[in-house]
Image (cartoon, coloured by chain):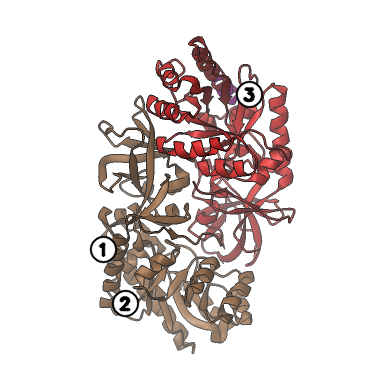
Chain colours: A brown, B red
Amino acid sequence: MTTPHLLVDPTKVEANTTRLHDHLTALGSTLRLHVKTAKSVDVAKIVFRGGTGPITVSTLHEAEEFAAHGFTDVVYAVGIAPDKLDRVRALRAKGVDLVVLLDNVDQARAAASAGVPALIEVDCDGHRGGVLADDPALLAIAGALGDGVRGVLTHAGESYYCRTEEALVEAAEHERATAVRAAETLRAAGFPAPVVSIGSTPTAHFARDLTGVTEVRAGNYVFFDLVMAGIGVCTLDDLALSVVTTVIGHREDKGWILTDAGWMATSRDRGTADQPVDQGYGLVCDRDGHLIPGLLMTGASQEHGVLSMRQGPLPHLPVGTKLRVLPNHACATAAQHDRYHLTTGDTAWPRLNGW
Amino acid sequence: MTTPHLLVDPTKVEANTTRLHDHLTALGSTLRLHVKTAKSVDVAKIVFRGGTGPITVSTLHEAEEFAAHGFTDVVYAVGIAPDKLDRVRALRAKGVDLVVLLDNVDQARAAASAGVPALIEVDCDGHRGGVLADDPALLAIAGALGDGVRGVLTHAGESYYCRTEEALVEAAEHERATAVRAAETLRAAGFPAPVVSIGSTPTAHFARDLTGVTEVRAGNYVFFDLVMAGIGVCTLDDLALSVVTTVIGHREDKGWILTDAGWMATSRDRGTADQPVDQGYGLVCDRDGHLIPGLLMTGASQEHGVLSMRQGPLPHLPVGTKLRVLPNHACATAAQHDRYHLTTGDTAWPRLNGW
């Protein structure tokens, strides 16, 4: 098979899935899988044991394609652009319970007049969009939505910057408490708001209490990556995704091994650059997935990778050697490819790229 | 049309093409278009005025697809992995003059035994691979290739870090002189080495003399981008590529406008971060392409963009407003999409992604 290409170990996807399932079950909650990381019906089928559970999407293209495969309980978790409501209505007319997200009155009026139900985005940590739980805008938006208020949604995006277990547990509890408070405000004002949706891969794993929460969203955890390992959400052994590459040359004068996987194959994502241990463009494993100690992908042009050692001499890796690179950010690396090859040798899984 | 999507102004592609064509013609050389930026047969047809001129590819997939459209003079400018030679031979058997690139004896032996001609990569600035022009390895590689020596290829990749016109002119001359010197070494040893191939978008535009050079490679210049404008190779008016996005919300407390174009649409490339003026994830224009002074895309998550001002108050851009973002790096941004929409409203141009 030509290099570079993506490789997935399905047994690791299963183990990651079981771990989060058991954790959420013990806390009395359930998963709404975020399909934005894998964008793969095959991965979702592993998560739902062959079934079609509730999903979160990041694009309407994902919503349409997953709906065609029987996934009819869908939250589109990017603030709705009003001119996308026609596509939303078309899916709803086919029986898909597609719910949108919004955080302002303009969007709420548009959703209400299109007859599309919505979750109100609540900001728990200043990460991105959303209204604050005690902002009067919450009730103004609900008023504009009327019967279309489905509930609230919060995403603790800043949990990616937590550095201790204590901080992660606290971020998870703050995410929960903020969402529940906002839902209670809506209910006190007469809006039923049945859904309280929270989640991020770090907080989903470090939640100790999910009282009042009706669903937890996570997606990255199906593969995990070096950023998640750096936060402490997983170990390097849990990483299910890698980029397979071939050695094409050496620059002994510079301490470099050159490969045929550049940023086109890994993405430009350098999420670990902000972490205590910068892993470059990725850690390097042999073709069977065993880490080669100290070897990093330190440079990338479009179709060239540069490998070098943190310290010490380069290992002997002749031209033609196959290697695996563990990525910084699974969502970004996978997005550079149109399919997943499998360690089992089974038929590749397609990805649903685009909008 | 849904957002985000890529938008190309074909009149700017034509103007960029004419400018480089005239420059190279005046210096007595010709272009070998690098198709890795646009990955588009339609763009190549503009460059070659409807014809099928010589091209450079970054993947064998590009070689195969362009060959199917009549482009039969092709250099694959990534060091060859020996197990890719079967695909190269299959194309050559169809009449495509596909030439590979290499910089070591292992590759040269493999190419020779496959009967595939090659250019020897020469390093002029320590950017990536290649042998130094005075390294005895040059003749050892030629010896292993035998009749397969087609010539030399150099890429002044470090020219991206030049900050003055003088430095760019010097980088271009050094690229030329290094390649010519290596070719003369080969010829003195009895290898005909008819091809002397050099190029990068900055040096192609700042070359003052191309004596001894038989072809110049460039690709980014068809679109240009903020990195090229920062180097001084083009003006902001020359940028032919943008990402169209929709405003989905505001965080007045933070000075943010939120959009539906995140890093999935722009890529994670932040090439201007290393330049004197950091342009964030991109400069922002209105829907017609007029710059909105001071407005930048300063943050990105997967499907969310954050816009903010360098200084001063945010402009009034209500929910639903369409905007264009000018990218840092056209090659990387275009790679996030499968087609180009056109300012003329004509049928979209497909891209040839993958390997």
The residue sitting at 60% across, 78% down in the picture is: A89
- Residue at numbered disc 1: A166
- Chain under callout 3: B
Amino acid type of the residue tagged 1 in the rendering: Glu
Pointers 2 and 3 in contact (C-beta within 8 Å): no
Q: Nearer the viewer, mark 2 or mark 1?
A: 2
Q: Which residue is mark 2?
A: A210
Residue span colored magenta:
B165-174
Across and down, in percent, residue B47 comes to 69, 38
Q: Nearer the viewer, residue B114 or B6?
A: B114
Disc 1 is placed on an element classified as: helix
| Pick the front one: B200 or A315 | A315
Q: Are marks 2 and 3 on the same chain?
A: no
Instruction: Point out the frontmost of discs 3 and 1.
Output: 3
Residue B308 horizontal/vertical position (percent): 56, 55
In the rendered image, the vertical position of residue A191 relative to residue B55, given as above or below: below
Residue that label 3 marks: B207
Dots 3 and 1: beta carbons under 8 Å? no
Indicate the chain on which mark 1 is placed.
Answer: A
Is there any visible trace of residue B44 in the rendered image?
yes
Percent of width and height locating residue B211: 63, 16
Query: Are labels 2 and 1 on one chain?
Result: yes
Give the quarter of the figure containing the N terminus of chain B.
bottom right
